[in-house]
Amino acid sequence: MAKVKETMYYLNNPERHIVMLASETQLKYEGIIKEIFGVVCESDLQMMIKFNKGFKESICHEFGVDENKITLSMVFRQATQADLVEN
């Protein structure tokens, strides 16, 4: 029987100091995004980045960037090999 490899995702909420890796299944069925960020889905993260001042400031502080340089991939993206080793 062949093993199915799942895509892993990197989630980082610098405002709450939470960094976590989650599988695709966890994202779909376990409400991990809500647990980490307090919003239901990935598209809501864009709204947080745009309108949540505390969240924006925490990202700027953590990554040393200006507000206009914030990207979704700073807080939610497919995990890299380095992420997998680090966490």
Image (spheres, helix red, strand yellow):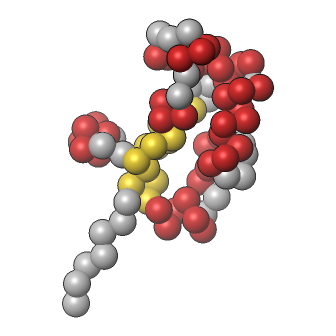
* In front of the other: 13 or 7: 7
The image position of residue 12, as x and y in percent, is: 51, 35
- Residue at image location 46% in from the left, 16% down from the top: 63
| Residue 14 visible to an observer of this rendering | yes
Left or right, 87 with reference to 23: left
* In front of the other: 70 or 79: 70
Q: How many labels does the image show?
A: 0
- Residue at image location 44% in from the left, 59% down from the top: 23
Single out the residue that lies furthest toward the front: 68
The image position of residue 8, as x and y in percent, is: 39, 55
* In front of the other: 3 or 49: 49
- Residue at image location 37% in from the left, 60% down from the top: 7
Q: Is residue 10 above or below residue 32?
A: above
* Quadrant containing the N terminus in the rendered view: bottom left
Left or right, 42 with reference to 8: right
The image position of residue 27, as x and y in percent, is: 55, 59
* Quadrant containing the C terminus in the rendered view: top left
Single out the residue that lies furthest toward the bottom: 1
Q: In this view, does 17 lie above or below 10?
A: above
- Residue at image location 52% in from the left, 62% down from the top: 26
The image position of residue 61, as x and y in percent, is: 54, 11
| Residue 61 visible to an observer of this rendering | no
